[in-house]
Image: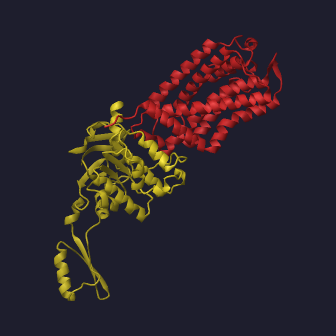
């Protein structure tokens, strides 16, 4: 008798399958990956101001869009598609096989990570070509960028899986999830300069990960001199890590404990 | 040896007592069919056996394992069973062969993918996207995914809903071939003729309890119940119930001097018996 395949190897197999399925849903590929690029094009063309010496709104917005890309491709996509899979009976069928829950989560994480990387490359490429965005040359900024993407995508994936228990049906999921993401984007300094928002809005945003991801991305893509323009006159890197880790733990906890495989 | 053993199984949802003390024993290698109206406790019972639901009380052993146990042991157990659920519409963007091949990777000793595709009759559709399959073809895929792990025990829930008569016949042949290869099958179905064609034994469940367990031909005293003999006498159709139909036919035969016109001898169908058994006690909401 052979051994049952390990959870990790099945997770990697599932990741491959998820990517293949995703790639075949053309509308969804276009919407998920290109929508932030389209937004960048619109905002970058409308707002051409310089918001600080050497910092254009396009640069500021690009940092915000990369951060929201982490939320869109992870949290939003999962919190909408998992309830659909549940409605279709796909999750219940998986539950009836020897595939462990962890493999399913690993597969989703792989899909999210791959689509995130593609989206970031698209945004950066577009920003460089059309909006004069320049890439940081300092290696320490790339290190910050790497852990931000890793931690941010892990956090976003875990919270998306956890939040998938909230929508009652697959059809209603988008109506529940999308407004939350859009409001968070407004509150977190994606569409507007964060320090120009009312302070109550800033305080609400500071509870959630997106505000910290946008600020973190600004620390990568804007000059260090801009740190003085932030709320606390600094990038608050340590605090960003702590808040993202806390949300990651919350997301993993609810994903593992409360995940629903069946409609009822 | 019993593959499934259930004693005193109970399950309530709030005030609704869905299952109120079910006892079942299913032997290795048999096709066992669970019959009952909607809301009788059929689905709850089966889902407890499949490990999808927990029970309130009673003991359950499926392949010597308690289905509500979690953890690695549960994976080992799921490795030995196959489940074909009532409906699924997932993974429309994958092909038949991709999906079956992927699921085969979940098990320690899967069946050969091509063989399984052949046995469910999907060879010509193996490279078709699932979204382009007909309802019946999709159901065959569901069955393929249920048997790909080479299960010792297969749960089949309403497998032929939406099939045309021809597809049902070939599906039955598939199920019978699984039985002859040693797979034990627990079948739930609304179609009494399906239970009659496939099942070695049937159990009728109603209001959360098993009313009777028997072979399809003996259920509800069917084999010993009165037969109906009908024939035509001139222009008039006649019919008579009898405990001794052979004697009656012999009498008729000598009366007509050989052939009896339009002779039919019948016993109540499984459906007649079943409807009689659940009639009167049926509650739509239990």
Q: Is residue A264 above or below residue B284?
A: above
Colour option used? by chain
- In the image, taking residue B33 as reference, residue A212 lies left or right, namely right
| Residue placed most toward the observer, B243 or B117 | B117
Look at the image and tell me whether residue B80 can be seen.
yes
Q: At which x and y percent is residue B40?
A: 34, 50
- In the image, taking residue B132 as reference, residue B115 lies left or right, namely left
| Residue at 56%, 24% in the rendered image | A155
Q: Is residue A125 above or below residue B141?
A: above
Q: Quadrant of the C terminus of chain A?
A: top left
Q: In the figure, the red chain has which letter?
A: A
Look at the image and tell me whether residue A200 can be seen.
no
Q: Which residue extends farthest right? A: A49
Q: At which x and y percent is residue B238?
A: 28, 81
Residue B279 location, quadrant: bottom left
| Residue at 69%, 11% in the rendered image | A234
| Residue at 44%, 60% in the rendered image | B163
Q: Is residue A121 above or below residue B114?
A: above
| Residue placed most toward the observer, B229 or B140 | B140
For chain B, give the colour. Answer: yellow
Q: At which x and y percent is residue A202?
A: 68, 19
Q: Quadrant of the N terminus of chain A?
A: top left
Residue B197 location, quadrant: bottom left
- In the image, taking residue A207 as reference, residue A252 lies left or right, namely left
Q: At which x and y percent is residue A56?
A: 80, 22
| Residue at 64%, 17% in the rendered image | A144
Residue A22 location, quadrant: top right
């Amino acid at each position: 008798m052979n051994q049952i395949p390990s959870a990790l190897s099945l997770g990697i197999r599932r990741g491959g399958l998820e990517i293949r399925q995703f790639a075949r849903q053309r509308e969804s590929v276009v919407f998920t990956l290109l929508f932030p690029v389209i937004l960048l094009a619109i905002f970058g063309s409308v707002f051409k101001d310089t918001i600080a010496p050497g910092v254009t709104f396009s640069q500021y917005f690009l940092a915000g869009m990369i951060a929201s890309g982490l939320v869109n491709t992870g949290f939003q996509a999962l919190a909408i598609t998992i309830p659909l899979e549940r409605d279709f009976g796909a999750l219940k069928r998986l539950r009836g096989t020897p595939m462990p829950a962890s493999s399913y989560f690993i597969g989703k994480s792989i899909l999210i990570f791959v689509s995130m990387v593609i989206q970031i490359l698209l945004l950066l490429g577009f920003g460089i070509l059309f909006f004069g965005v320049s890439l940081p040359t300092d290696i320490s900024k790339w290190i910050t960028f790497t852990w931000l993407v890793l931690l941010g995508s892990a956090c976003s994936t875990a919270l998306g899986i956890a939040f998938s228990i909230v929508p009652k049906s697959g059809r209603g999921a988008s109506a529940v999830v999308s407004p939350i993401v859009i409001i968070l984007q407004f509150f977190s300094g994606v569409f507007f300069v964060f320090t120009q928002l009312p302070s109550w809005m800033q305080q609400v945003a500071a509870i959630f990960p997106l505000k910290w991801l946008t600020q973190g991305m600004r620390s990568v893509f804007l000059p260090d001199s801009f740190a003085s323009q932030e709320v606390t006159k600094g990038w608050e890197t340590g605090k960003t890590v702590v808040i993202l880790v806390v949300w990651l733990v919350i997301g993993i906890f609810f994903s593992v404990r409360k995940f629903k495989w069946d409609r009822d | 040896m019993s593959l499934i053993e259930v004693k005193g199984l109970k399950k309530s949802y709030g005030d609704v007592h869905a299952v109120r003390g079910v006892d079942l024993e299913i032997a290795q290698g048999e096709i066992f069919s669970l019959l009952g109206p909607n809301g009788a406790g059929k689905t709850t019972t089966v889902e407890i056996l499949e490990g999808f639901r927990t029970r309130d009380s009673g003991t359950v052993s499926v392949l010597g394992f308690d289905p509500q146990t979690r953890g690695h042991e549960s994976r080992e157990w799921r490795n030995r069973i196959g489940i074909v659920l009532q409906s699924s519409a997932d993974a429309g963007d994958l092909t038949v062969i991709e999906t079956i091949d992927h699921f085969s990777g979940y098990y320690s000793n899967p069946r050969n993918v091509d063989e399984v595709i052949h046995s469910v009759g999907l060879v010509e559709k193996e490279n078709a996207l699932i979204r382009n399959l007909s309802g019946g073809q999709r159901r065959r895929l569901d069955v393929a995914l249920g048997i790909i792990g080479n299960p010792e025990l297969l749960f089949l829930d309403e497998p032929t809903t939406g099939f045309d008569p021809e597809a049902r016949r070939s599906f039955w042949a598939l199920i019978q071939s699984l039985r002859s290869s040693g797979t034990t099958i627990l079948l739930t179905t609304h179609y009494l003729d399906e239970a009659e064609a496939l099942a070695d034994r049937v159990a009728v469940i109603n209001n959360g309890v098993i009313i009777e367990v028997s072979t399809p031909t003996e259920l509800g005293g069917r084999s010993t119940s009165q037969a109906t003999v009908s024939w035509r006498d001139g222009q008039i159709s006649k019919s008579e119930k009898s405990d001794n139909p052979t004697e009656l036919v012999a009498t008729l035969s000598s009366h007509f001097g050989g052939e009896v016109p339009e002779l039919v001898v019948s016993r109540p169908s499984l459906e007649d018996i079943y409807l009689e058994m659940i009639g009167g006690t049926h509650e739509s909401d239990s």
